[in-house]
């Protein structure tokens, strides 16, 4: 077991948001989290990332308390600085962590080819497509070599075609690097396509309402969207959300 989230409770002021949220994630597993709008998904990620201290409960990684250095957090917006080159943007996290600028840039540059960004090292974010900006934001996250990636609606702002392309790409690079990933999404199809399991949150205050496995072989491609198992899993998730 990689991650153990045990009995998390969080209230923001007088508003209870999380109520006894408990689940496990295995090393190398891809787990998506879906639920009603406002259920507390981003609050949960803020707890995991160390940005919010829970009122009760704990987060363990390999049996030890998690630290801020455990999780790499990619928020919904790419947050690329427009005045910095793409290379400088992707190296920023390493620089903030104390890595010398030359070493940080060299480490980030190594990932430009597998992330489909080769040749754009000196470009500015405004020169990139939406999909390429999200690749750069994810590169900035993974280059820090954190144990677990937290992806909060990374493709939510993209058009349907670009989103599908990015989902296929994420499936490919995740398999290559063996990342442990937690994903927040409102897209049920995205959750099924990318995940080993999907956790369904109840309305606020959130608990884990259902846990639904995705019994599809990997590697995955868009041809599996018509697989009966895919459709059955989508239907189960829709039912769970409506319960």
Image: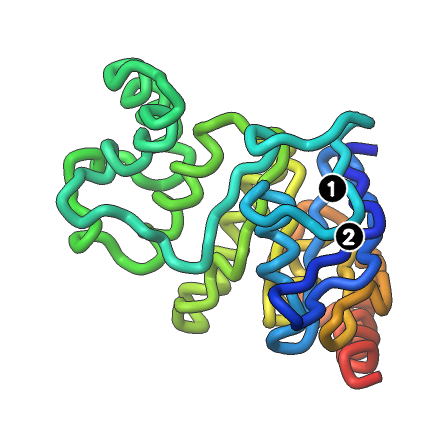
Residue carrying label 2:
8
Mark 2 residue element: strand
The disc label shown at residue 29, or none: 1
Q: Quadrant where the N terminus lies?
A: top right
Q: Position of residue 230 (x, y in %)?
A: 76, 68
Q: Quadrant of residue 131?
A: bottom left
Q: Residues within 10 Å of mark 2 (few under 14, many from 20)?
A: many
Q: Callout 1: 10 Å neighbours few (<14), some, many (20+)?
A: some
Q: Classify 116 as above or below 2.
A: below
> Where does residue 241 sit, x and y in percent of width and height?
76, 79
Q: Position of residue 179 (x, y in %)?
A: 62, 35
- Rounded to the nearest angstrom, the CA distance separating label 1 from label 2 is 21 Å
Residue 91 makes an appearance in the image = yes
Which residue lies most toward the bottom here? 242
For the point 40% across and 68% down, which residue is it? 157
Q: Dividing the picture into quarters, in which one does residue 37 lie? A: bottom right
Who's the residue at 25% across and 33% down the image?
87
Residue 74 drawn at (x, y percent): 48, 48
Q: Examine the rendered structure and indicate whether residue 175 appears above or below residue 184.
A: above
- Horizontal relation, residue 162 to residue 11: left or right: left
Task: Report whether residue 224 is seen.
Answer: no
Quadrant of the image containing the C terminus: bottom right
Q: Are marks 1 and 2 in contact (CB under 8 Å)?
A: no
Q: Residue furthest front?
A: 14
Residue in the image at 62% along x and 54% along y: 183
Earlier in the chain: of badge 1 and badge 2, it is 2
Locate residue 36 relative to residue 174 in the image: left or right. Answer: right
Q: Which mark is residue 238?
A: none
Dot 1 falls on a residue whose secondary structure is loop
Instruction: Please name which of the two marks, 1 or 2, marks the residue nearer to the observer.
Output: 2
Q: How many marks?
A: 2
Relative horizontal placement of residue 165, taking residue 117 as reference (left or right): right
């Amino acid at each position: 077991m990689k991650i153990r989230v045990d009995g998390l409770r969080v209230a923001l002021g007088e508003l209870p948001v999380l109520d006894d949220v408990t689940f496990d994630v295995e090393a190398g597993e891809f787990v998506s989290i879906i639920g009603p709008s406002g259920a507390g998904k981003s609050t949960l990620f803020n707890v995991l990332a160390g940005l919010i201290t829970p009122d009760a409960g704990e987060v363990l990684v390999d049996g030890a308390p998690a630290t801020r250095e455990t999780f790499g957090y990619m928020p919904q917006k790419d947050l690329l600085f427009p005045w910095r080159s793409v290379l400088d943007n992707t190296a920023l996290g390493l620089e903030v962590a104390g890595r010398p600028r030359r070493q940080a840039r060299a480490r980030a540059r190594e990932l430009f080819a597998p992330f489909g960004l080769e040749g754009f090292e000196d470009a500015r974010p405004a020169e990139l497509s939406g999909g390429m900006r999200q690749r750069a934001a994810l590169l900035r996250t993974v280059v820090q070599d954190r144990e677990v990636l937290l992806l909060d609606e990374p493709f939510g702002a993209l058009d349907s075609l670009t989103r599908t392309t990015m989902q296929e790409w994420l499936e490919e690079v995740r398999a290559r690097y063996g990342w442990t990933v937690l994903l927040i999404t409102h897209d049920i199809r995205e959750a099924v396509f990318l995940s080993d399991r999907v956790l369904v949150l109840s309305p606020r205050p959130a608990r884990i309402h259902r846990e639904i496995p995705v019994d599809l072989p990997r590697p995955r491609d868009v041809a599996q969207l018509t697989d009966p198992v895919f459709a059955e899993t989508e239907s189960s998730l829709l039912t769970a959300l409506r319960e």
